[in-house]
Image (cartoon, grey):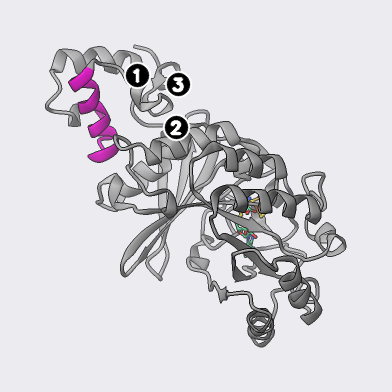
Amino acid sequence: MASLQDKTSLLSLPIESLPGEGYRRQQLAGWLYARGARQWDQMTDLPRALRNEWAEQFRVSEFAEVLPYPSQDGSVKYLYTLLDGQKTEAVYMPYPNRKTLCISSMVGCPAGCTFCATGKMGFGRNLTAAEIVDQILFAAYHQGHTPREIRNVVLMGMGEPLLNVENVFAAIERMLHPQGLAMSPRRITLSTVGIPRGIYKLAESGLGVRLALSLHAPDDETRQQIIPTALRYRIAEIMEAVRHYYAQTGRRVTLEYTLLKGLNDHDWQARALAGLFKGLSVHMNLIPWNPWEGAPHQGTPKAQILKFATTLKQQGIPTSVRWSRGQDVGAACGQLALKQPA
Ligand code: SAH
Ligand code: SF4
């Protein structure tokens, strides 16, 4: 029998291209995306002979192993070992009225942001569309939910989604498809460090998902200290792409701003940010920096975070502070580095 890696991944196939004709294909899609089957023998209403035939050719799951790490606050970090032995992570966050999953688009990340543990790891590889979608399917299964009960997905885990556009867009198509996860595009957020050509592609794609931009500074000088690699584009260029995205989609853009002590948390920077976004519909999420071992930064003290937020609000920018979850298991924003919690 062929090894799992040699078989065709079912989740890699567009839903229209799943095996089987008409009703049988719909049944298979239902098992994968609506009922969350992870093994062929769960698909009891498919004839056994057909299941055996398909099981020879196709695989249902993308992981060799998954380890869950529950946090005291109810969130759970999942550490996935992929079939080639590489690893990636996702974080499940239950809230009273919604369940959110933060998923990864890469193993590691090439952007190298100095405050981010994933950036420090460097780039491993792009995840396939199947590996991206299966993070959701597995987490739902492990939580005892059907896949469609996970109603919110944020692409804010490991990696830069707009440097893996083809696979990320294919994964989003499976999430949106009525026979896939049947999600609303408004409940999917793609977060980018600001890759202009990727933002244009997202605008043209018609996928309709939300865009979050991780800006981290209103000026190129400060940003250069935070993102020291060639993947840092000029703010003017990023803003042009964001304005195009807004003109094309009419969608409010979320801004992500991780506050680093003495670097990007000055009052003048809050005012400069407000100037940058005049006339655009945006929402600012201020993220208190989450520490990790060996990081060359300190977080902004709480009083200064609140002052920065107040200045932004006074300048007309709707602003929230996003206190992180899952710190105790290394699941908070930017802590994903494949370290197994103690
Ligand atoms: N590469 C994409 C998506 C993954 S990072 C991006 O950069 O947007 C998702 C978010 O986590 C980013 O907004 C980033 O600023 C934030 N982040 C990374 N490291 C962090 C840390 N140590 N503390 C707080 N937020 C962090
Ligand atoms: Fe990559 Fe985002 Fe981390 Fe920067 S913050 S290194 S872009 S994952």
Q: Which residue is mark 3?
A: 5
Who is closer to the viewer here, 251 or 3? 251
Disc 1 from disc 2: Cα separation: 13 Å
Q: Position of residue 110 (x, y in %)?
A: 71, 43
Comes first in the chain, label 2 or label 3: 3
Q: Position of residue 12 (x, y in %)?
A: 43, 26
- Look at 73% across and 55% down and name the residue there: 239
- Identify the image quadrant of residue 99: bottom left
Judge whether residue 135 is colored magenta. no
- Which amino acid, by three-letter code, is at mark 2? Ala
Q: Which residue is mark 2?
A: 130
- Which amino acid, by three-letter code, is at mark 3? Gln
What's drawn in magenta, residue-wise? 22-40
Q: Which mark is residue 58?
A: 1
Q: Is residue 325 above or below residue 150?
A: below
Q: Nearer the viewer, mark 3 or mark 1?
A: 1
- Look at 36% across and 36% down and name the residue there: 177
